[in-house]
């Protein structure tokens, strides 16, 4: 079964929007691993970028003066 990158990205964004970063990161890592198992480098790159964005969001929310 192939992962629908767009649907999974939307699903992850819902958790980010709610501030549930733990769930968002877990879902992103799971999606990244699914892409890795399927040798889908485009998907791997996509989900790494999402992880970076989540971390950036966390930094902005919890370190606003830096």
Image (tube, rainbow, N blue to C red):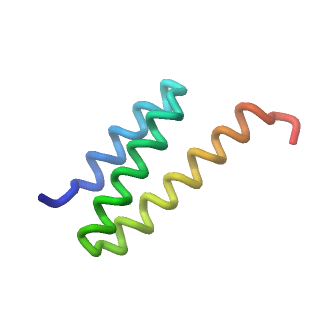
6 vs 38: above or below: above
62 vs 7: above or below: above
- Residue 64, by quadrant, is top right
User: Is 52 left, or right, of 60 in this rendering?
Assistant: left
At which x and y percent is residue 52?
A: 58, 55
Give the camera-side residue of 55 and 13: 55
At which x and y percent is residue 29?
A: 42, 52
Q: Give the quarter of the figure containing the C terminus.
A: top right
Residue drawn at point x = 48 percent, y = 43 percent = 25
Residue farthest along the left direction in this orientation: 1
Q: Give the quarter of the figure containing the N terminus.
A: bottom left
Residue farthest along the right direction in this orientation: 65
At which x and y percent is residue 2?
A: 16, 60
Residue drawn at point x = 35 percent, y = 60 percent = 33
Residue drawn at point x = 26 percent, y = 46 percent = 7
18 vs 47: above or below: above
Give the camera-side residue of 66 and 38: 38
- Residue 46, by quadrant, is bottom left
At which x and y percent is residue 61?
A: 71, 32
- Residue 58, by quadrant, is top right
Across the whole image, how many numbered discs are drawn on residues? 0
């Amino acid at each position: 079964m192939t992962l629908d990158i767009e649907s999974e990205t939307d699903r992850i964004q819902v958790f980010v929007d709610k501030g549930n970063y733990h769930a968002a990161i877990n879902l992103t890592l799971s999606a990244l691993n699914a892409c890795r198992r399927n040798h889908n480098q485009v998907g791997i790159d996509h989900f790494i970028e999402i992880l970076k964005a989540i971390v950036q969001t966390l930094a902005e929310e919890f370190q606003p003066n830096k």
